[in-house]
Image: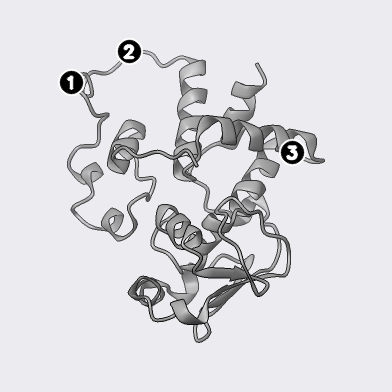
Amino acid sequence: MARYTDANCKLCRRERQKLFLKGTKCYTDKCPIESRNYPPGQHGLSRRSRISDYSLQLREKQKIRKTYGLLEKQFRSYFEDASRKKGITGENLVRILESRFDNTLYRLGLAPSRKAARQLITHRHLTVNGKVVNIPSFVLKSGDVIQVREKSKKLPAFHESMKRMKDNMLPTWLNLDKANMAGTFLHSPERAEVPFIGNEQLVVELYSK
């Protein structure tokens, strides 16, 4: 499975904002954005006098793609899938991204980041409706129940994540049972429910050219 292996903090600096790719580090003073909020490299501090529409659209696409930890081919596939569905393409894209297994695990607070969620999933620590699923891109449906396997419940990673998870942090389309380390995907979220980090409409404009 192809994946990004370079430093995650460089991705945040390139977009000049936190994409919350490093879990707890993103909430501390150790986050590079706090002290170096400019793109990496020798020309990082230089500024262009004018940003073109294409550049703005590209940066929004890259920002969203990096936030969810996707490579270009996979992200483009999700966009094409969203464009075939009824409704607004941008909102369909958001729903698909938020319905991914790794993202849902992160939203439930069972993992500190989406990258950590992917690792836990591929190591077969989670089940969906009682069956082990080790595919991070698995798309959940309404009513699906995610649960930590019994033999994995002692892992420190889960307990540390649960301690940081507050009730007011849980999205409205998810339900969490902390005692049993289980969560339910209630329904695909509406756009207004998602604390989204980018402008999906600019992605639609970019891919529609």
**Residue 103 image point, x, y percent:** 53, 55
Residue at x 66% of width, y 49% of height: 95
Image quadrant of residue 116? bottom left
First in sequence, mark 3 or 2: give its number.
2
Q: Is residue 30 placed above or below 4 in the rendered structure?
A: below
Q: Which mark is residue 42?
A: 1
Q: How is the image coloured?
A: one colour
Mark 3 vs mark 2, CA separation in Å: 34 Å
Residue at x 54% of width, y 69% of height: 126
Amino acid on which the number 2 mark rests in the picture? Ser
- Residue closer to the observer: 52 or 62: 62
**Residue 42 image point, x, y percent:** 18, 20
Q: Are marks 2 and 1 in contact (CB under 8 Å)?
A: no
Q: Is residue 69 placed above or below 103 in the rendered structure?
A: above
Q: From the viewer's perspective, is the residue at label 1 or at label 3 nearer?
A: 1
Q: In the figure, is residue 107 to the left or right of 139?
A: left
Mark 2 vs mark 1, CA separation in Å: 18 Å
Amino acid on which the number 1 mark rests in the picture? Gln
First in sequence, mark 1 or 3: give its number.
1
Q: Which residue is mark 3?
A: 88
Mark 1 vs mark 3, CA separation in Å: 40 Å
Residue at x 50% of width, y 61% of height: 121
Extreme residue toward the bottom, this view: 179
Image quadrant of residue 206? top right
Q: Which mark is residue 49?
A: 2
Q: Is residue 27 placed above or below 73 in the rendered structure?
A: below
Q: From the viewer's perspective, is the residue at label 3 or at label 2 nearer?
A: 3
Q: Which mark is residue 167?
A: none
